[in-house]
Amino acid sequence: MYEHMKKLMLSRAVCEGSDTRAKYGELFNKLDVNKDGKVDILELQQGLKAMGMAVATGAEEKIVAAGDTNKDGQLDFAEFMKYLEDHEKKMKIAFTSLDKNADGKIEASEIMNSLKTLGINIPKDHAEKILKSMDADGTLTVDWNEWRDHFLFNPADNIEEIIRYWKHSTVLDIGDSLTIPDEFTEEEKKTGQWWKQLLAGGMAGAVSRTGTAPLDRLKVMMQVHGSKGNSNILGGLKQMVKEGGVRSLWRGNGVNVIKIAPETAMKFWAYEQYKRMFTSESGKLGTAERFIAGSMAGATAQTSIYPMEVMKTRLAVAKTGQYTGMFDCAKQILKKEGVRAFYKGYVPNILGIIPYAGIDLAIYEVIFSVVLFYSTVSDETKT
């Protein structure tokens, strides 16, 4: 349905050989709903939605800001035309840089090779996912017309920004380890988009942790008490309810939720610092460097919030009435055991984090190399 609408509403307006003013004029008239000779952000949003064109969050604001030379918050026809002409030129440069064999089409292998130069390795099926998001005729290749139609109203104007768009729109899975925080562009940092995404992720994490808190506490109880308690899930849950009521199922969850924010913030900050340390002179960060920086960021974040991890575990295994809350738990631990008690179990925890990224990287690279080898052999056999 999306491709049908796109072809119907857009391809007639933007096609090779047609007059530039005419093709942009038709698009402008479709977007200028109130026919006042100008297109504002709301009209752009409604118009693109009506045309079945999905754009990144905040794209309409960026388009208007980029083309609005007189700063009136709207685009007249001249500004609209100038923006699209300039943007089309940038899109042509991006298309040409991907089209390595200069045959006028972008193939999965070309996307894979281009991403690899940026330190991102993806398998062929992921590259094909990217192609399918732009491929209007089902050939699993993208020509200039399809590329232009797809990115005409997307403010991304270079390969790095296009990859960022693919990643954030979930079209592209670059195989990031969970130890590696999300990366943000300088623009996203300046506009505050980075903290909105971190906030959304934190809220999602809080909801998911709260939903699974009873099972998480049951897991800890079974690990600590072993055969002394019930050996099955239902029996264990019943025992916890009997001992402390329904609320006891979520004992320790408050600390678990609260530590999301500082852990995420520390992980993001530390990752940025470690990336600068490992970035090469060319300004690129390879896959190995990403995983190393990620594991070090994970270790740094864990070090900063580890006392909260200890309190969460203590609260989870505590009997009803032993602690009145998180602060009482911290007070009792400090009074009875001292500061060092907040870092009990720290060494094996960190030793588990550090090699995780290396093992993950090694397995990923081996599997990727095998798949890539057999894919290449298969393609050569067919040709």
Image: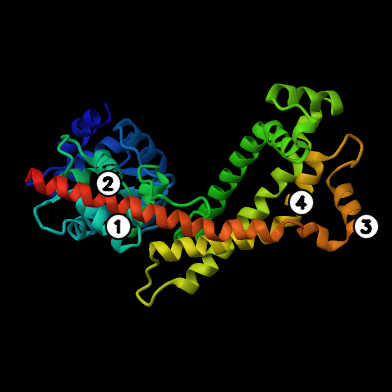
> How far from the left and from the top, in percent, is residue 176?
44, 52
- Disc 3 marks a residue whose amino acid type is Lys
The CA span between labels 3 and 2 is 57 Å
Residue labelled with disc 3:
335
| Sequence-earlier tag: 3 or 4 | 4
Image coordinates of residue 238 in percent, x first then y, are: 77, 22
Q: Which numbered disc flags the more N-terminal residue, 3 or 2?
A: 2
Instruction: Determine whether the residue tagged by mark 4 lies in a helix, strand or loop.
Output: helix
Residue 35 makes an appearance in the image: yes
At which x and y percent is residue 162?
Answer: 32, 53
State the SS at label 1.
Answer: helix
Type of amino acid at the residue the image marks with label 1: Leu
Callout 3 crowding tier (Cα within 10 Å): few <14, some 14–19, many ≥20: few
In the rendered structure, which amino acid carries the disc numbered 4? Answer: Val
Q: Which residue is mark 1?
A: 115
Q: Tell me the element at label 3.
A: helix
Of the two numbered discs 2 and 4 in the rendering, the one whose residue sits closer to the viewer? 4
Q: Secondary structure at mark 2?
A: helix
The residue that disc 4 covers is 310
Residue at position x 49%, y 64% in the image: 292
User: Looking at the image, is mark 1 or mark 3 nearer the viewer?
Assistant: 3
Contact flag, marks 2 and 1 (Cβ < 8 Å): yes
**Residue ID at (68%, 32%):** 215
Mark 1 nearby-residue class (10 Å; few <14, some 14–19, many ≥20): some
Between marks 1 and 3, how big is the CA–CA gap?
A: 54 Å
Contact (Cβ within 8 Å) of mark 2 with mark 4:
no
Residue 127: give its label. Answer: 2
